[in-house]
Image (tube, rainbow, N blue to C red):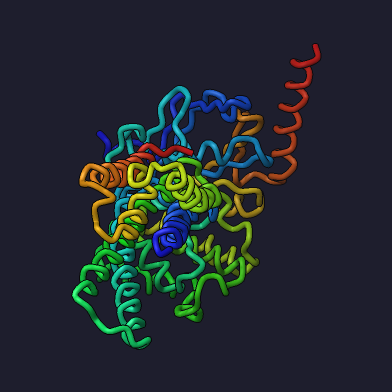
Amino acid sequence: MPGEAAAVELVAASKKYREGAALQPTNLVVQRGQVHALVGLNGTGKTTLLRLVLGITAPTAGRVLVRGVDVARMKPAGWAGVGHLIDTPLVYPELTVQANLQIAGRLSGLGLGSGRAAARRLAEELLLTKWWTRRARTLSLGNRQRLGIAAALVADPDVMVLDEPTNALDPAGTVLVRRMLLERVRETGASVLVSSHHLDEVARIADQITVINSGRIIGTLAPDGIDLERRFFNLVNADVEANQRQANP
Amino acid sequence: MSTAAGLLAFGIVHAWSFGREFSEGTITGLFALPTTRTMVAGAKLLVLCLWVFASTMVLTGVAVLLGAVLGYEPTADTFSLAARLAGSTFLTGALAVVGGLVASICRSMLAGIGSAIVMPVLAQVAVLLGLGGWFPFAAPGVWAATVTGGGVFGIQLAALLVMTAGAASATVYSWHRLRL
């Protein structure tokens, strides 16, 4: 039953470009009501994995399921309730904060009235009302990123896929977004699949942490354990050394 | 002149409208939505079509007004000449759909703008080679310049409309099939 399925599931999903494999066959399950963090160094396949989940790119092999439905066969209505922010926020510089949020609401399937109300609510939640009538191009990088997060969450999604959502935020903005995500998970049972470089932040919000390196999942980390950074580098360095031994036996 | 300039101006706006999503990176935000990319591309084409129509009306109105201000007396041909200007301008705007198609296929605003620059150049070359109205990009200009109205026949107009419809359909299809 789709109602009981995991929020996101990858079944031996892989992605190969002409330049080489971006993601080796990967299995991953994001349970409902959980925050699942993907951590890894730059260029290790995190964004590719998130792109597969959203159908931005198609898997070379394997399957990707969102709420139990294969992304390759997902009907448009099936994407309702999936909020995402990958690479660049869906923010148009010449439009105001208000117009950007209302458009995001309409694209996410909200009606005219409910879209306006949701835009206002998200702007208040992410402290953007001060710039409500300002064009997005005049906002600072951090405020633009907050606007992008607001646009991704405007329709109150129950599945959120976020690629380094706090990388341009100041500490206050990071705390704000973290609190907002956790509220949604605890109050509505929403699920979050998030990639991040900030191990400290990940430790504060994640129920599960998956480590990815060279396009492969190389292990998991307990978020409540001590010295997350050391354990992360232990895993990554062990994988790098194993790869080197394999390449130069 | 209006058709050559129109092909460039309308083509650039078409290329910007579709190509900006790739150049600015907002295209990823248009995936995984209940509103499909097919609908987004269709909506862009509809808005551009309405904008081309509005621009055509304004341009024609300004031309007629300017004629009156400069002291040209209205003649029996004034209405047909204004209609010819409006028709050729609108058809030029319709052809500019190709700029959006190139930007979509190449995933680049610059490629679309490049095609908008090349289109009027090709039209001029086609006219010099004597192809005239048989080359769709040159057809509106030839039609506008032919006072007797016999330069471009119905079949040439049909070719132009088929090409425009084909380019619009291909644009929507490329957005439907798009994977990054």
- At horizontal 74% and vertical 15% (from top left) the residue drawn is A246
* Residue B76, horizontal then vertical, whole percent: 19, 75
Measuring 52% from the left and 36% from the top, which residue is drawn there? A49
Q: Position of residue B87 (x, y in %)?
A: 27, 61
One can see residue A69 in this view = yes
Q: Is residue A135 left or right of residue B75?
A: right
* Residue that appears at 66% across and 30% down: A214
**Residue A116 quadrant:** bottom left
State the residue in front, A218 or B66. Answer: B66
Vertical placement of residue A75 versus A153, above or below: above
Please give left or right for residue A34 compared with residue A18 in the image.
Answer: left
- Tell me if I can see residue A35 in this picture: no
Q: Quadrant of the N terminus of chain B?
A: bottom left
Residue farthest to the top, as pictured? A249
Residue A19 sits above or below residue B125 on the image: above
Rendered view: A156 above or below B55: above
Residue A142: quarter of image: bottom right
The front one of B26 and B108 is: B108
* Residue A41 image offset from top left, x and y in percent: 68, 40
Q: Is A178 left, or right, of A67 in this rendering?
A: right
